[in-house]
Image (cartoon, grey):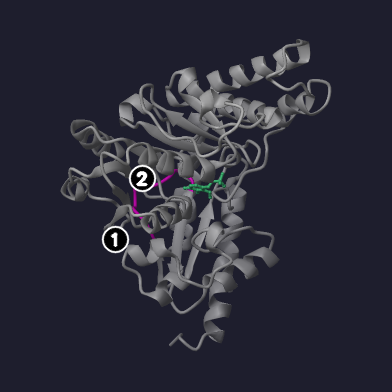
């Protein structure tokens, strides 16, 4: 129940990748047969990823991860447009791949506006509009949040960005393969996705770059990926991403169906006294449930669930090594002790109603046990 941290590689994806580790090991830049085979496989994968998000094949750049795609989109855009201005607009609940990139850019002389969100985690498009200045050279607002699952009004922000002719990036790592995405309909210029969140391999990402958008490369070398991202391509990884994208497109209705399991989980868990749902009640990812329980710590719940065979997380997997309360939960107005009492359960295609029933049956006992030990409990 931690599919937003990562997913298992689909067996069909593994099967598609395997030949590119062994008999089809050619360097895609080589002119002979196995090199050309690798090149063809990459171009087929590019088309499949483009089809998933309604893009053109030439607009897809393969990278080493979602984090790299975010870095490339943000730094690449602002470095390219430095002469036009120095101002970036983002939100206070972005993934660290965006947030820490923006913080780094502040040390390089750029100015960043971190927009607040409401109690459900929504960015207000009026706030985006009010934050725009003649110096604004990038807007980066995530499609859906990785912790609380809130889906942002991305089309409205896209319209604003277009009117003002400001490049617009969205981190769609959590929505890729889960929600239908059409880059024209949502009006983005740059969009990041990552294979391992959609039953593909780890260590391969994509940056969608609308035709005509110019960015500065961050890695210089032999000019691969149209000079935007040099280095010999990760052929098996890219082939795996292509297959995962093809499967994801077919399985979008199944992903939407996960809502039923999610809602059953939410109903069951909220039966527990002093438990609350974090994030928007309806504008949320079909697989995301994020709760808070008064008087106890998320970490203890995660460890107790693990002992009962359930994988869960507090807030975000990415911040689990830190004792700081989640920046997302603080941004929606929770007190630090409330933020510490949060539990994220994210479902996937391999979960069943039995899984949900099992969690709903064991969680009250775990919560009660922890509350009995808690000095905060009444
Ligand atoms: N952006 C979001 C919203 C994410 O959830 C993640 C991963 O947790 C990333 C970016 C980073 O992606 P990757 O793990 O491929 O670097």
Residue beneath the point at 60% across and 45% down = 352
Q: CA distance from mark 2 to mark 1?
A: 13 Å
Does ligand 1 reach within 8 Å of label 1's beta carbon?
A: no
Report whether residue 148 is seen. Answer: no
Foreground residue among 377 and 65: 65
Residue beneath the point at 38% across and 47% down = 284
List x then y, in percent, for residue 42: 63, 21
* Dominant secondary structure (helix, strand or loop) of the stretch shown in magenta: loop
Q: Which mark is residue 119?
A: 1
CA neighbours of label 2 inside 10 A, class few (<14), some (14 to 19), many (20+): many
Depicted 58 relative to depicted 270: above or below: above
Task: Name the residue tied to disc 2.
Answer: 151
Query: Residue 312's quadrant in the figure?
Result: bottom right
Residue beneath the point at 31% across and 67% down = 333
Describe the element under mark 1 as helix, strand or loop. Answer: loop
Q: Is residue 282 magenta?
A: yes
CA neighbours of label 1 inside 10 A, class few (<14), some (14 to 19), many (20+): some
For this view, does 325 lie left or right of residue 167? right
Depicted 83 relative to depicted 267: above or below: above
**Earlier-in-chain disc, 2 versus 1:** 1
Report whether residue 258 is seen. Answer: yes
Q: Which residues are magenta?
A: 277-287
Foreground residue among 319 and 36: 36
Q: Which mark is residue 28?
A: none
């Amino acid at each position: 129940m931690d599919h937003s941290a990562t997913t298992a590689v689909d067996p069909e994806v593994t099967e598609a990748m395997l030949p590119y580790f062994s008999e089809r090991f050619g360097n895609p830049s080589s002119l002979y047969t196995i090199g050309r085979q690798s090149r063809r496989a990459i171009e087929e994968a590019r088309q499949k990823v483009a089809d998933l998000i309604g893009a053109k094949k030439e607009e897809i750049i393969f990278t080493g991860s979602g984090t790299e795609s975010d870095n490339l989109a943000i730094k690449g855009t602002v470095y390219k447009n430095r002469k036009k201005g120095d101002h970036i607009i983002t939100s206070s609940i972005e993934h660290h791949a965006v947030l820490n990139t923006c913080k780094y850019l502040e040390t390089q002389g750029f100015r960043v506006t971190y927009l607040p969100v409401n109690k459900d985690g929504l960015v207000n498009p009026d706030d985006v509009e009010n934050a725009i200045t003649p110096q604004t050279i990038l807007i980066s607002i995530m499609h859906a949040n990785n912790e609380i699952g809130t889906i942002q009004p991305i089309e409205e922000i896209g319209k604003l960005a277009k009117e003002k002719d400001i490049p617009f990036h969205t981190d769609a790592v959590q929505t890729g393969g889960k929600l239908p995405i059409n880059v024209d309909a949502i009006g983005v210029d740059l969009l990041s996705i990552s294979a391992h969140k959609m039953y593909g391999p780890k260590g391969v990402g994509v940056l969608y770059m609308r035709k005509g958008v110019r960015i500065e490369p961050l890695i210089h070398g032999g000019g691969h990926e149209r000079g935007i991202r040099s280095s010999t391509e990760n052929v098996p990884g890219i082939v795996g991403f292509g297959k995962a994208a093809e499967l994801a497109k077919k399985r979008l209705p199944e992903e939407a169906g996960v809502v039923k399991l999610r809602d059953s989980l939410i109903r069951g868990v909220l039966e527990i006294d002093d438990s609350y749902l974090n994030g928007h009640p309806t504008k949320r990812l079909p697989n995301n449930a994020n709760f808070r329980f008064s008087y106890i710590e998320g970490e203890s719940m995660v460890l107790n669930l693990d002992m009962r065979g359930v994988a869960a997380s507090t807030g975000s997997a990415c911040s689990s090594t830190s004792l700081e309360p989640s920046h997302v939960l603080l941004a929606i107005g929770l007190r630090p002790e409330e933020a510490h009492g949060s539990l994220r359960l994210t479902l996937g295609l391999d979960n069943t109603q039995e899984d949900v029933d099992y969690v709903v049956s064991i969680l009250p006992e775990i919560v009660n046990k922890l509350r009995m030990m808690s000095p905060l409990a009444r």
